Amino acid sequence: MATVRMCNIGRLQNVWKISRRSSYLHPNPERNTIKNDDLEKYRKSCLTQNPEKVTSKLPDAKPANIEEYRHLYPEFLPHPNWLRRDFLKEQLERKDMYKRRAILSIPEFYVGSIMAVTVADEFAPNRENRFVGICIAREGVGLDANFTLRNVVDNQGIEIRYEMYHPHIQKIEVLKLEKRLDEELYYLRDAPPEYSTIPFDFEPVQFAKGSKVPVNPIKVKLNPRPWLQRYERMNLKGVQDLELPQRFYDKAAKVAKPWEEKDLMKNYRETINDDEAAKIFHEVLSHTLDYKETPKKP
Amino acid sequence: MSSTLGHGSGPSGRIERLRRVVTALMRYERLESHYYCLDEARGYAERIIHLAVRNGDSDKMTMETANYWLLEKDLVQKLFNVLAPRYSNYTTSFTQMHVLPCAYPGPGGTLGILELKGNPWPSVLPKERNTKRERLIYLSICYLIVKNICFVFFFSPFLPFPFILSTSCMHVSE
């Protein structure tokens, strides 16, 4: 047979067996035979066919200002947990965010800034509700991005959590642009009311564009325990001495995890890396994010 | 050195052990140990080298990181002066891992090798044979030998095994 003659002598036996066996199944024995030479190219490992290439292309340099944009537009970065990620959803959400920003001004703000938000409210007089407060938290990614305003009205602490891209929001104003020493100000809940009392007629403080955002170095004096959280374990910078018995500090030192700051891979997995962030911000900055009201023609 | 570092010593001991492995890797460029320990240390070594390549020794955060993770301080200089230039053009990973066969009787765990790419040691893997080329060379040598023998004995009437020689000759030429 042709197949037998083509192969060399060492493999003759195998090919002969295959063709004999297949002859039971098929009237034409040459149909089901596999030539060893044809098999040869599939016998190699994947690496020999696609070896790892070391090209001379330089890796992209670290883009400038990436840290600034991380703080300025944190909601554009996707969730760092890979189990929660969906590339299509992220893209579509970003598109919706550009559309929303094209008709609503969402100014630059940080935790610690004093803000006023006007929301459409069917049952309020003038069908709108304006709330003034200090921003104590900014969370969420994508269309879920939100911030929390806190104020004390009639000796009653009030916090409202606004979704930034919610269609009910009509206006977001930043009355005083500043940062605080901490990234979250939840401890204001356990502080005397004067730290979070802001009058509703608070006059906006002018901020020179292009200058550095000031950091308010105020240190808050907390109420005595009981508290809502264990603040002694949080390494807060914006609070005065907590005046606790020594056993609280001992316990805090016992449960502290100082090595987590140094854990490179933990840090890497819990943040969006610079390359990906640069790619996203490149896309974000190609859109107009600052909506400016044009004067209406009479 | 306590022997309890690593498995069973908690998260702080884990970091402590990883620091030793990373330091040893930067020093010797090839390590042989338990596979899963090396696999865990690999990411940290890659990350340190990547930071060194990206930011250089002028960046404060990178310098602090290298200072923490490399226990022997002469390796900080090696990182920035030797390894960072070596890997500056790489688009692939900087390290490589191999699984070693299970030794019996032995420790029982999977053993492995972790090495930096471009190290001065001889390669772990054997050189891959090009069987096709070797076969061609072998056949051509056979052909030359048989041809010469044929030439000598062609006119001889008492040729030993003339049939076999002539058929193998034909086979080779085919």
Image (spheres, coloured by chain):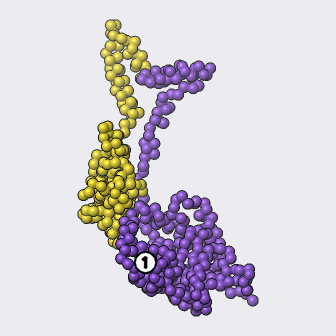
Chain colours: A purple, B yellow
The kind of residue on which mark 1 rests is Leu
Point 37% across, 32% down: residue: B134
Residue A180, given in percent of the width and then of the height, sits at: 47, 82
**Quarter that holds the N terminus of chain B:** bottom left
Please give the chain letter of the residue carrying mark 1.
A
Decide which of A78, A35 is in the foreground and name it.
Answer: A78
Could you say which quadrant of the image residue A24 lies in? Answer: top right
Q: Residues within 10 Å of mark 1 (few under 14, many from 20)?
A: some
| Figure check: A46 above or below A61 | above
**Quarter that holds the C terminus of chain B:** top left
Decide which of A66, B97 is in the foreground and name it.
Answer: B97
Could you say which quadrant of the image residue B87 lies in? Answer: bottom left
Residue A244, given in percent of the width and then of the height, sits at: 40, 79
Q: Is A162 situated left or right of A123 in this image? A: left
Kindly identify which residue carries mark 1: A236
The reply to whether residue A103 is visible in this rendering is yes
Q: Is B63 situated left or right of A31 in this image? A: left
| Figure check: B173 above or below B121 | above
Residue A89, given in percent of the width and then of the height, sits at: 61, 62
Point 33% across, 69% down: residue: B64
Residue B147, given in percent of the width and then of the height, sits at: 35, 20
| Figure check: B157 above or below A288 | above
Point 32% across, 18% down: residue: B149
Helix, strand or loop at label 1? It is loop
